[in-house]
Amino acid sequence: MAPTGFQFSAEDLRNILISGVVVGAAFAAYKTVTSPIPMLTLLFFGLITVSAREIGQRMVAQSMEAEVSSEVSRSGAVTTLVVAMLSYISSFSLVFLVPVFSSFSVESHQHWGKGIDAIWAKREYWLASAGITSLLVIWALAFLGDYNILAEMIALFTFFQLLPLDAEKGICGKLDGAYIMLWTGFTWLIFMGLTIIAMILSVL
């Protein structure tokens, strides 16, 4: 059983660490960073980025008795690193950040109405939206604090998390965008619009 609320299993922590390192390494290749100290800084920023999403999801999970499990997509992580390698050895700035996704489960539907499918989709929507909202909040803090590299990394990671890809149609598990799009495309458009604005502001 996955941990409820802010509880993290050993596997969750391992997956968050792996995902953070992959995100940081991919972003370092995207920026052609090779020096040890800047590289370590970007790896740390990768952990902050992935953790921001996890904290947002688990804050909401705690209030709805939901269970969140952090999972590493092997194909997504490999693709992320392959694109990073191509970016590093070529003259093109390429980035692809999809090493992590989440699975959700809940113990009770007793106060959520009559339609179990609708209840389940709504809970997944809230949990996924919480992760995206948390990322955008941390992006704003990084941007206002002049941590532009961290802000850019968060914005790019959020963009890829908003892609409406799922396990059957993509290579990276079911991303947050798929959960949000399933419930309402309007919210997805708002999140994507804010994320694109964040991406632009981060590089100005």
Image (cartoon, rainbow, N blue to C red):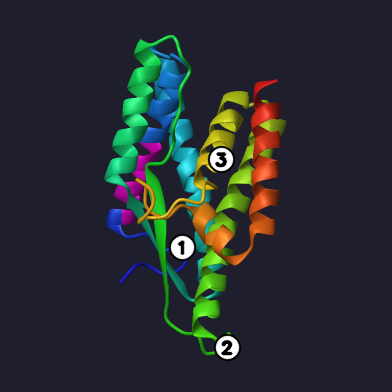
Query: In the depicted view, which residue is nearer to us: 18 or 6?
Result: 18
Q: Which mark is residue 6?
A: 1
- The residue carrying pointer 3 sits among few (fewer than 14), some (14 to 19) or many (20 or more) residues within 10 Å by Cα, namely many
Residue extending furthest toward the top: 91
The picture places residue 51, in percent across and down from the top left corner, at 47, 46
The residue where tag 2 is placed is 111
The residue where tag 3 is placed is 159
The picture places residue 188, in percent across and down from the top left corner, at 63, 53
Circle 1/circle 3 CB separation < 8 Å:
no
- Indicate whether residue 74 is drawn in magenta: no
Q: Is residue 37 above or below residue 78?
A: above
Mark 2 and mark 1: span between their CA atoms?
Answer: 22 Å
Q: Secondary structure at mark 2?
A: loop
Sequence-first disc among 2 and 3: 2
Looking at numbered disc 1 in the image, what kind of residue is underneath it?
Phe
The picture places residue 137, in percent across and down from the top left corner, at 65, 46
Looking at numbered disc 2 in the image, what kind of residue is underneath it?
His
For image coordinates 34% across by 41% down, the residue present is: 76
Give the magenta range: 12-21
User: Quarter of the image containing the N terminus?
Assistant: bottom left
Q: Is residue 79 above or below residue 114?
A: above
Magenta span main SS? helix
Q: Is residue 3 left or right of residue 138?
A: left
For image coordinates 50% across by 62% down, the residue present is: 58
